[in-house]
């Protein structure tokens, strides 16, 4: 029984080590790919606006939405 337990524990640590090694390599690979994309394609940033969406919103609509959110929070808190 002791030999089987020892063998099982060795197998468990080997499996955990392989998973840890794989996940570490995955994180390193993702960080390297991210750095390469940011270096070679800097114009593709998330700060660009989406075409077709206007930011010209009527102030009365903003006021109505703000009032609705305030009323909802007041009612449900």
Image: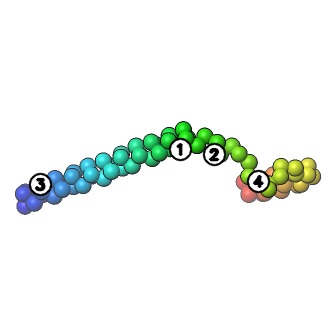
- Residue 66 seen in render: no
SS for tag 2? loop
Label number found at residue 51: 4
Q: Earlier in the sequence, mark 3 or mark 4?
A: 3
- Per the image, the residue denoted by label 3 is 6
User: Viewed as shown, does residue 77 lie left or right of 42?
Assistant: right
SS for tag 3? helix
Q: Earlier in the sequence, mark 1 or mark 3?
A: 3
Residue 28 quadrant: top left
- Per the image, the residue denoted by label 1 is 37
Q: Comparing marks 3 and 4, which lies closer to the viewer?
A: 4
- How far is mark 3 from mark 2, CA to CA? 54 Å
Q: Earlier in the sequence, mark 4 or mark 1?
A: 1
Instruction: Kindly identify the residue that appears in the image at 33 percent across and 51 percent down.
Output: 22
User: Residue 48 at what x, y percent from top left?
Assistant: 71, 45
Q: Comparing marks 3 and 2, which lies closer to the viewer?
A: 2
């Amino acid at each position: 029984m002791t030999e089987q337990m020892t063998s099982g524990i060795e197998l468990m640590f080997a499996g955990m080590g392989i998973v840890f090694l794989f996940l570490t390599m995955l994180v390193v690979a993702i960080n390297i790919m991210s750095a390469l994309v940011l270096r070679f394609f800097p114009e593709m940033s998330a700060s660009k606006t989406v075409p077709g969406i206007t930011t010209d919103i009527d102030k009365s609509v903003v006021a109505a939405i703000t009032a609705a959110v305030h009323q909802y929070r007041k009612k449900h808190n």
